[in-house]
Image (cartoon, rainbow, N blue to C red):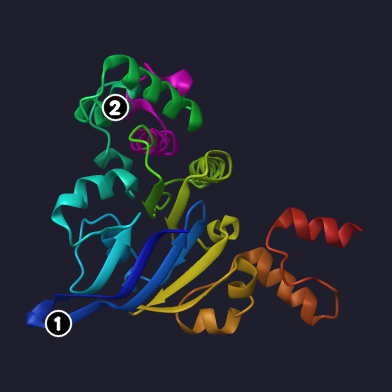
Amino acid sequence: MEIIYTRNLCFSYKGEGDRIIRALDNINLTVKRGEFVAILGPNGSGKSTLARHLNALLLPGEGEVWVDGMSTRDESSRWQIRQTAGMVFQNPDNQIVATTVEEDVAFGPENLGLPSPEIRQRVDQALRLVGMSAYRQHAPHLLSGGQKQRVAIAGVIAMRPKCLILDEPTAMLDPRGRREVLETLQRLNREEGITVLLITHFMDEAVAADRVIILHEGRLLLEGTPAEVFLKQDWLRAIGLDVPPVVELAGELRAAGLNIPPDVLTVDRLVDLLCC
């Protein structure tokens, strides 16, 4: 059963000189419960605009968006929609509001008016799920970028969302921070059943997804498993995207006559095949 559904979603805004820019053009998208979906596309393709529609931060110019059966056009449902589909942004500093980690994670549940024991339980669980329990008394500004982003994710998790929407959450992080955040998202999806929509410009992060969606100039051009999408290397390059280096290497080895299956997407898998 789907948790997110869009039908003929369109959105436009005024650019320079009052020029109308079509940011989203007839987007039809279904996301199933428990799915991990990566949304890719070059700059200006509409990725962030789509993300904000799925959390009701933006409303459709045309078409419809439903989140867990609720229309974002229904003003009375928007608070519940934003609890159902929690949003994590690129810069964690924009989401951290307190002086200690546990106070920050408690901020959302406190605003829900929950009793103190329930807030404590939610904070403890959220910090455990993102691997930050040992840092509960730390000042957020002293944490690394990856740790800050995990705290930001914990703050959303404490609201008990069914779905996480992440708008380029690793764009400002070093490789270690990126790995920490991606491992956290995979664990939340796999072990807790939380639906994950990851918007990213790092193609290698999409390898972890169940499904990859490609946006270009506001249109949904392609979707499929990572293996299906990354096989279209020439097509991806034509719209300004690349493929993970290991996928490119596997393609070159395949062209050279080696029997490399098309679903080889990671270094470990490629090494295992070559060492057999």
The one of 204 and 83 positioned closer to us in this rendering: 83
Marking on residue 20: 1
Q: Is residue 147 above or below residue 268?
A: above
Q: Is residue 17 magenta?
A: no
Query: Residue 47 appears at what percent x and percent y?
Result: 35, 66
Q: Is residue 240 above or below residue 32?
A: below
Q: Is residue 36 visible?
A: yes
Q: Residue tagged by mark 2?
A: 104
Q: Is residue 149 magenta?
A: yes
Q: Is residue 172 visible?
A: no
Q: Range of the magenta residues? A: 133-156
Query: Residue 114 appears at what percent x and percent y?
Result: 25, 23
Question: Residue 211's quadrant in the figure?
Answer: bottom right
Question: Residue 216's quadrant in the figure?
Answer: bottom left
- Could you tell me which secondary element the residue under label 1 belongs to? strand
| Mark 2–mark 1 distance (CA, rounded to whole Å) | 40 Å
The one of 100 and 55 positioned closer to us in this rendering: 55
In the rendered image, the quadrant that contains the C terminus is bottom right
The main secondary structure of the magenta stretch is helix
Question: Residue type at mark 1?
Answer: Ile
* Horizontal side of residue 225 vs 89, given as left or right: right
* Horizontal side of residue 234 vs 48, given as left or right: right
